Amino acid sequence: MVYKYGASRGSQGHSAGGNAGPPAADARSRILESAIDLFGEHGFQEVSLKAIAAHAGVSAPLVIHHYQSKAGLRTACDRHVAEEFRKSKTESVRFKGPMPRNYALDAIYANRHLLKYMIQAFAAGGPNMDELFDRMIEDSLDYLAEAESLGLVHPSKNPRHRAVVIFLHSFGALMLHKQMEREFGVSPLDGDPKDLLPYMAAVLEVHTQPVINAEKYRELMESQEAFDRDIHNDVPEDAPGAESAVPATPQRSGTDR
Amino acid sequence: MVYKYGASRGSQGHSAGGNAGPPAADARSRILESAIDLFGEHGFQEVSLKAIAAHAGVSAPLVIHHYQSKAGLRTACDRHVAEEFRKSKTESVRFKGPMPRNYALDAIYANRHLLKYMIQAFAAGGPNMDELFDRMIEDSLDYLAEAESLGLVHPSKNPRHRAVVIFLHSFGALMLHKQMEREFGVSPLDGDPKDLLPYMAAVLEVHTQPVINAEKYRELMESQEAFDRDIHNDVPEDAPGAESAVPATPQRSGTDR
DNA sequence: TGGGCGTCTGAACGGTTGTTCAGTCCGTAC
DNA sequence: GTACGGACTGAACAACCGTTCAGACGCCCA
């Protein structure tokens, strides 16, 4: 189902002042915030310029007047979201003293409209958000390094790889927030952050105690190496680039699709 | 950018037989596979019926003739993907003896067109894939239980919660495969599975050795509880449901968006 | 031989999309 | 007072969308 018209603000005229909700700022920035909200909620293709204009209480050609095209509006959204993210980052850095509990959860909740937009943007791809993604990786690397200096986080053989993996895991789980809501009864992007504690407890367990027994895993790998050797013992040599010895699901295995 | 016309198979006529690629099956199933491929590659809204028809070498009305509507085609795709997933699952179960190394990686690669479709389907939401998601959770729970019985995986306080978290993390990271490709140089859904070993090594480290020092974490939580008490020591009682004491980014904090 | 039926097509339809156009309103500078 | 320029609008535009329609083709059964 395609999203058509949002709940218009009703301020259909030009200078309708004291309205509920956001302080009815400049029309240009109202358009931008409406676009971020609707894009984040429904995706880029699903939301029409007319829906954005109606949500901002203006006409569709005005959107073009200010942002030249729908693609221009989207890159403006990208830039604005990146800028907002940068601001909230520096605010959290300025926060001295012991962090309150669940600071991260509350920060997620307070910026959930930005996160929803990022989720849509990362899902849709496009090079506009790559720089933001890199910065987020760098930030989480910084956080992990600081936590490591406090002894809260263990050292890693490859800190950057670990930071990337943890970030991909965390943000990726956020992209599945609808399924997360079905499994845990609460979405990290709606609902009360307090209700997320069961989920956080499960994440904490995965991060505080190992899931895989490293010793057993190493034994298993060694026995499988021997198994692979046994399989290949009548073949003189592996042709380089040949497919692996695994008889994975055979259908479609040779096509280029 | 909207995807318009795929690389048509060239079999523009009706009975063009021996073509490269898939064995030019029934037109009806050719439409279904084209739809799964294109939907998975570009998303639902981005792909038009005409593009699917061109990719399958048929006309657009024939798609309607077989599947009634675009929505009908999508639910048919959902069902087909779920069925294919079920089949490949039972195949992997029938696989006896020691698993070859990187079995999971090769299985991902062999079924990457299905995975790409699932990613788009989960990102777009909709209730059609919920059942499949639940089954995947159940499957991973089974795998983890079996690995636990082998001593390969440590026990958990809440095995189901842990299985959900691990699955959300793994599949969520897959949804960010474009960013993953930028960070690790290889995508799990294209390219050679062998090149994924650096990524797998990082994941393995996160799963074999704890990231967070549980003892330090507990100390931190206790000190923060004391901190929270100090903050509230002049307030007689917390109003139930009131916002937390965290001064998270102030802008927009009161609105309903 | 003929009639029905499923497959499949080109042409066309109504609707929505992003965008353009001509023009109105309004605050500001001269 | 008037010319100007930006904000903003309704009407209109071409393009594309999913879908419908009428008909052509080939195959099976009588």
Image: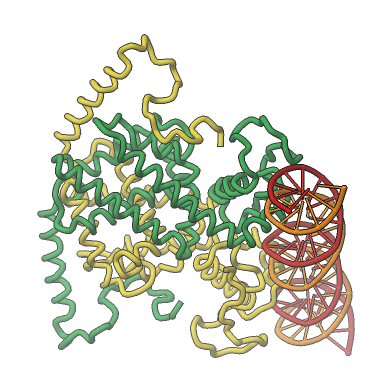
Chain colours: A yellow, B green, C orange, D red
Would you place residue B254 above or below residue A96 in this image? below
Q: Residue A32 occupies which quadrant of the picture?
A: bottom right
The quarter of the picture where the C terminus of chain A appears is top right
On the image, the x and y values in percent for residue B211 come to 21, 47
- Taking the image as shown, residue A198 lies to the left or right of residue B24, namely left
| Residue positioned 69% across, 62% down in the render | A69
- Taking the image as shown, residue A56 lies to the left or right of residue D26, namely left
Would you place residue A159 above or below residue A176 in this image? above
Q: Residue A237 occupies which quadrant of the picture?
A: top left
Would you place residue A250 above or below residue A70 in this image? above
Q: Could you say which is closer to the camera, residue B138 or residue A85?
A: B138
Would you place residue A216 above or below residue A48 in this image? above
| Residue positioned 29% across, 39% down in the render | B202
Tell me how many marks there are: 0
On the image, the x and y values in percent for residue B24 come to 63, 37
On the image, the x and y values in percent for residue B100 come to 30, 29
The quarter of the picture where the N terminus of chain A appears is bottom right
- Taking the image as shown, residue D10 lies to the left or right of residue A9, namely right
On the image, the x and y values in percent for residue B146 come to 20, 44
Q: Could you say which is closer to the camera, residue A233 or residue B193?
A: A233
Q: Could you say which is closer to the camera, residue B184 or residue A152?
A: B184
Q: Residue furthest top?
A: A236
- Taking the image as shown, residue D13 lies to the left or right of residue B195, namely right
| Residue positioned 53% across, 53% down in the render | B77
